[in-house]
Image: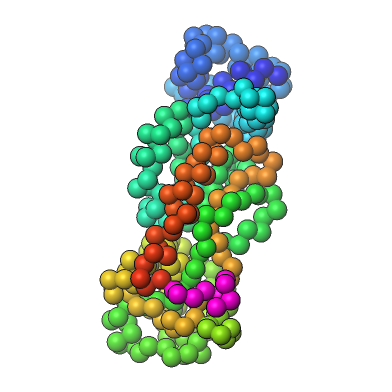
C-alpha cells in the first residue's frame, strides 16, 4: 500500500476536500482524485462520498481512517529509529478534553504552541462528554479519572484533588456541616453521576460523601454550570481543586469540611490508544502540556491549596 496515497486519504478525510489535500502534497486535483480512486479499488470500498458540492467520509472510510493514521504513524516511527525522521512535527492533531479545564488552562496557552509548531493543525473537542478515542479517531485525550481502560496508555499530567465547597450565602442560610454525617441534611449540587465518594480526613479518618442521601439534589452534566450554581448558593458541591481554587482564594466559595478530601484516586491523565505509535505531533503536545501545566500546577501554588493529601498519607 502506497503510504503517500494513504497520507492523501487522511488529509482529504480531515479537510473534506480532495483538491486541498492534494495541493498540500503537491498534486493537481486530477492526480489526487486518481490516486484516491486507486486506493479505493485496492481496499474494495468507497472511502469518500463525492458530490458536486462536498466530500464526506463513507461508513467504510470512517472505519478505515484510524488504521490509515496508524500506517502513517508506523512509517514515521520506523524512519525515526533510523535517524531519518522529519525534524518538524506535522499534521492534524485531534485532542479532546473536559471543557472547563480546557477553558481555564489549555486554551490560554494554545497560541504559544501553535507559534512553536506551525506544521501542526489542532482539532479540539472540548466537552465534559467523554468521546471514544478510537471511534472518534482522536490522537490524544485529557481524562480526569482513574485510568481503567486497558486499551489506553497514559501520561500523568497532575493529581486531581477534589474537595467540597459552598458559597458563603448558602452556609449563612443553612449552616456549615461539622462532620460528614451532617451532609445528609444539606442541599447537594451533583455532577452527572450521584455515586458515593469516599472521604478521608487527617490521620486517616474515613467517611462517605453520598449525594443520594442529601435532603435535596440538583444534578448537572456540565462542570462550569455546577460551579456557577454553587456560587449562586444552590448547595454544597464536590469540585476539582483546579476548578475552584481562584474562588476559594477570593472568598466567593468556602471549603466545606476542610479536614477532608475526596479519596477516589482521581488523576489528570493524557491518554492515547495503546495500539497507536506515539507520533511526533502527539509527543510534542504532551511535552508542552507537561511543561506548562503538569510541572507546576497553578492550583497547587495557591495559598489556599490543601497542605496535606490522602495521596501522600499525611
Left or right, residue 149 beside residue 283: right
Vertically, is 187 above or below 295?
Answer: below
**In magenta segment, residue 95:** no
Q: Position of residue 194 (x, y in %)?
A: 54, 73
Picture quadrant of residue 311: bottom right
Residue 35 in view (yes/no) = yes
**In magenta segment, residue 313:** yes
Image quarter of the N terminus: top right
In the depicted view, which residue is nearer to us: 213 or 96?
96
In the depicted view, which residue is nearer to us: 163 or 307?
307
Residue drawn 55% across the image and 44% down it: 140
In the depicted view, which residue is nearer to us: 183 or 303?
303
Residue drawn 47% across the image and 54% down it: 295
Total marks shown come to: 0
Q: Which residues are magenta?
A: 306-314
Residue drawn 62% across the image and 38% down it: 278
Amino acid at each position: 500500500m502506497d503510504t503517500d496515497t494513504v497520507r492523501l486519504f487522511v488529509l482529504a478525510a480531515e479537510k473534506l476536500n480532495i483538491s486541498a489535500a492534494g495541493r498540500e502534497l503537491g498534486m493537481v486535483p486530477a492526480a489526487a482524485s486518481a490516486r484516491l480512486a486507486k486506493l479505493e479499488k485496492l481496499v474494495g470500498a468507497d472511502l469518500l462520498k463525492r458530490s458536486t458540492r462536498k466530500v464526506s467520509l463513507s461508513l467504510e472510510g470512517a472505519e478505515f481512517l484510524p488504521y490509515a493514521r496508524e500506517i502513517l504513524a508506523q512509517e514515521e516511527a520506523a524512519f525515526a529509529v533510523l535517524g531519518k525522521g522529519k525534524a518538524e512535527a506535522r499534521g492534524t492533531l485531534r485532542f479532546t478534553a473536559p471543557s472547563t479545564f480546557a477553558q481555564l488552562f489549555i486554551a490560554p496557552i494554545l497560541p504559544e504552541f501553535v507559534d512553536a509548531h506551525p506544521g501542526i493543525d489542532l482539532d479540539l473537542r472540548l466537552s465534559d462528554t467523554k468521546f471514544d478515542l478510537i471511534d472518534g479517531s482522536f490522537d490524544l485525550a485529557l481524562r480526569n479519572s482513574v485510568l481503567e481502560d486497558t486499551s489506553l496508555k497514559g501520561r500523568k499530567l497532575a493529581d486531581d484533588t477534589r474537595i467540597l465547597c459552598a458559597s458563603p450565602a448558602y452556609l449563612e442560610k443553612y449552616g456549615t456541616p461539622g462532620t460528614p454525617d451532617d451532609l445528609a441534611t444539606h442541599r447537594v449540587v451533583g455532577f452527572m453521576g450521584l455515586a458515593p465518594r469516599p472521604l478521608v480526613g487527617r490521620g486517616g479518618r474515613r467517611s462517605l460523601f453520598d449525594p443520594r442521601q442529601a435532603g435535596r439534589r440538583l444534578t448537572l452534566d456540565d462542570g462550569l454550570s455546577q460551579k456557577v450554581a454553587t456560587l449562586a448558593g444552590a448547595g454544597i458541591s464536590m469540585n476539582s481543586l483546579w476548578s475552584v481554587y481562584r474562588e476559594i482564594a477570593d472568598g466567593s466559595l468556602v471549603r466545606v469540611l476542610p479536614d477532608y478530601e475526596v479519596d477516589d484516586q482521581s488523576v489528570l491523565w493524557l491518554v492515547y490508544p495503546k495500539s497507536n505509535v506515539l507520533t511526533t505531533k502527539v509527543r510534542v503536545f504532551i511535552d508542552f502540556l507537561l511543561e506548562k501545566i503538569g510541572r507546576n500546577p497553578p492550583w497547587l501554588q495557591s495559598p489556599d491549596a490543601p497542605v496535606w493529601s490522602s495521596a501522600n498519607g499525611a
